[in-house]
Structure formats: C-alpha cells, structure tokens
Image (spheres, grey):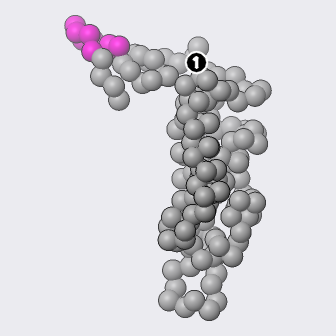
Amino acid sequence: MKPEYVDIDDLATVFPETEQAQATDDSDSRKNIVRDDEIVKEHLRFAESKVESYLLEYDLPFDDPPHSIRWSVLVIAAYMLMLRGDLSTSDNVQEMYENVIAWLEKVRTGEASLPGLETTDEDYVGFGTRRNMEYEYFPYQDFQSNYII
C-alpha cells in the first residue's frame, strides 16, 4: 500500500535521500548504505494517518490534498525517520515538526482552516461534539455523562 498524498520521492524536499538511507538501512554494512523504500513508505503512511487524525471534520481521504497537508505529511515522516535512525534532529527540523503539529491542532479546533475545503460538520452523526470528543450522553441510557475520550 502506497501513501495517498505524497510520493516517496517528494520526501527529498525536506529530508535528503542520503539521510533517508542512513535512517532506514538496517544492514551491518556502513559502506553501501541504501534507502529501504518500504520503511520510508510505511513512515509516510503513518504520517498521513497522523495528519488525518487532526482533520476528522473534513471529507477524508482528500482527492487533491492542499499543499499544506502534503507538506505536513513530509515533515512528520522526516521527523519520525530521523528518530528511527537515531539521527540527531536539527533545531530546524524540530521546529518544523512542532510548527506543523501546532498548525494541525489549530485546524482541529477551528482556529485555522484549510483553504477551499469544506468541513463535514453538519453531516456528523454522533452523541457529542466532534471538536473535543466530549460525549454529552450515550444512547439508550438514563444518565448523563461527560466522559472524555
């Protein structure tokens, strides 16, 4: 299964292929280091899933994701690959990752939005508010509850 929003070669815009190879080559040899494409794809898919977890009010998956979403996926994947490879993350990469997560959180809470995309909030069927996942009541119960999931 390949990532939906980005191609494996797109990752080079934020994480050079030589460093991708260092982060994914699990062989004992350090002379002919080769990027493991499957590991990279796995991290890209995980990053897409993480990004989508902040965007539950949108119709997912995106057919044509905005550039900001593609960039978020690449930054998160690069950060995770650096951690996997025990590569030291530069202050720049750390800051990009933190900025992406902060922006996604703002999108999730409604403080920021994705240009040109509508939310599906009016289509949401549930037993509480999607914004904070606080369930106000459960169906078929005689009690009120404020469980936070």
User: Relative to residue 125, is residue 87 depicted above or below?
Assistant: below
* In the image, farthest residue toward the front: 91
Q: Position of residue 88 (x, y in %)?
A: 55, 68
Left or right of residue 129, residue 136 in this image: left
**Which quadrant holds residue 147?**
top left
Q: Is residue 45 visible?
A: no
* In the image, farthest residue toward the top: 142
Q: Which residue is drawn at the image coordinates 71% and 59% (left, top)?
A: 14
Which of the two residues, 127 or 78, is positioned nearer the viewer here? 78
Q: Position of residue 62 (x, y in %)?
A: 68, 37
Residue 61 is covered by the magenta coloring: no
* Neighbours of disc 1 within 10 Å: few (<14), some (14-19), many (20+): some
Which of the two residues, 58 or 86, is positioned nearer the viewer here? 86
**Which quadrant holds residue 134?**
top left
Q: Position of residue 80 (x, y in %)?
A: 54, 59
User: Relative to residue 29, is residue 46 depicted above or below?
Assistant: above
User: Mark 1 = which residue?
Assistant: 121
User: Relative to residue 95, is residue 129 depicted above or below?
Assistant: above
**Element under disc 1:** helix
Left or right of residue 104, residue 135 in this image: left
Q: Position of residue 4 (x, y in %)?
A: 67, 49
Magenta extent: 136-145
Q: Which residue is drawn at the image coordinates 50% and 89% (left, top)?
A: 28
Q: Quadrant of the N terminus?
A: bottom right
**Which quadrant holds residue 51?**
top right
Q: Amino acid at mark 1?
A: Asp
Q: Which residue is drawn at the image coordinates 76% and 42% (left, top)?
A: 67
Q: Which residue is drawn at the image coordinates 62% and 43% (left, top)?
A: 100
Q: Is residue 62 visible?
A: yes
